[in-house]
Amino acid sequence: MCFVCLFIASMYSLLFCLILAQTASMEFSPSLNRKTNFILVKPGQNLTLPCHDKDDVSTRIYWFKQTLGEKPRLICTHRISSKDWKFVNDFKTNPRFQLHPGNKVANLTISDLELSDSATYYCVNHYLNVNDFLEGYNVIVEGSGLTIDQSASQSIQAGGSVTLNCTVHTGWTCDGDHTVYWFRNSGQSQLGLMYSHTGRNKQCERKTNTCFYNFSMKNLKTSQTGTYYCAIAACGHILFGNGTKLVFEDKGNYLVLVYFLSATWIFTIIVVILLTISLYMTKKRNSHHSLDSQSGIPDSPTANPAGNQKEDNLHYAALRANQSNRSRKQKNRQNECVYSTVRS
């Protein structure tokens, strides 16, 4: 009995040590399968980022802020059981950040938005050593004096190429290099960084503070559809463009329509030809029947224009001719009668 109790105690101790080891080795690893929302706001506005916890076993909820090119920073923690929360780092002295907890809800509010608030915000629930990313928001605060022009959408073809253009009007007097980022939002995950470039572009016009950037892609695939954003970071500011949406031209539907119309056209021509042949054969057969019916009726010399003869208008006379020069052998022959018709 004591041996069994000792064995059970040993197993519990081993399990507790394993849990502690896993908890100590826990790392921050964002899930790329979560959909990230894209939010474009103006300076001075207020923004509330909702976070809904659908799991009943969660013990805490974390809010993180990740500025472009930096690691995620913890904003605050919320203990679900006690319904209390705590801001950490420099956020605990920033009254613009507030948390509004509730029943499975921990919404983060940022008031009087500034350019430095442009970042990606993550809501994470925590249970033991498991972190689950509930929500993700790409918050972009528009910078004054900085505008980016991008075409709204472009049609592309599979296997083709495309060049995305980005025109930046800085309006700044500060000198320095611009860092250009190209992001892709497929609608299924957070924004993915496609390309970055640092340095002054040769096509920048210093007098007008305007720069021209482009991003080329070749051998396009259907998986590359989405919205591509041009982002500029310079002089401590960052701004995203409105994005260019790439849409594939669905040639399959057009080909099906062309094939269907072609088949319909050919079928119509065949039907017209068959109907023409059938009409010709029917007309020819009727003409033959008409000729046969006319050849079976003898022609009458007294036929009136209507083709009929009237018995009242016919008169018959029998003429007998005797020829004395005939031989005796012909005397016994039947007299020959000749009929004539006399019109009244």
Image (tube, helix red, strand yellow):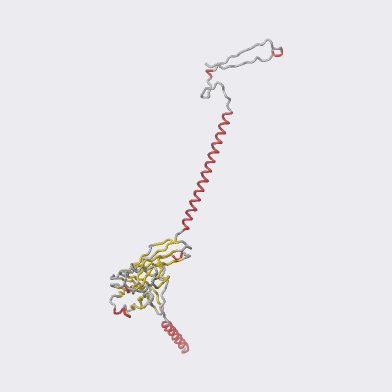
Which residue is pictured at 47% across the width and 58% down the height?
251
Establish if 259 lies above or below 126.
above
Residue with the most extreme bottom position: 2
The quarter holding residue 105 reads bottom left
Residue 265 in view of the camera? yes
Residue with the most extreme front position: 207
Task: Please name whichever residue, 193 or 55, is drawn nearer the observer in this view of the structure.
Answer: 193
Q: Is residue 45 toward the left or the right of residue 12 in the image? A: left
Q: Position of residue 172 (x, y in %)?
A: 32, 71
Task: Please name whichever residue, 144 or 6, is drawn nearer the observer in this view of the structure.
Answer: 144
Residue 103 in view of the camera? no
Which residue is pictured at 49% across the width and 48% down the height?
265
Total of numbered circles in the picture? 0
Q: Is residue 113 toward the left or the right of residue 163 in the image? A: left
Task: Please name whichever residue, 114 or 136, is drawn nearer the observer in this view of the structure.
Answer: 114
Establish if 171 lies above or below 300.
below
Which residue is pictured at 37% across the width and 64% down the height?
150
The quarter holding residue 15 reads bottom left
Q: Position of residue 229 (x, y in %)?
A: 39, 67
Q: Is residue 77 toward the left or the right of residue 267 in the image? A: left
Q: Position of residue 319 (x, y in %)?
A: 61, 13
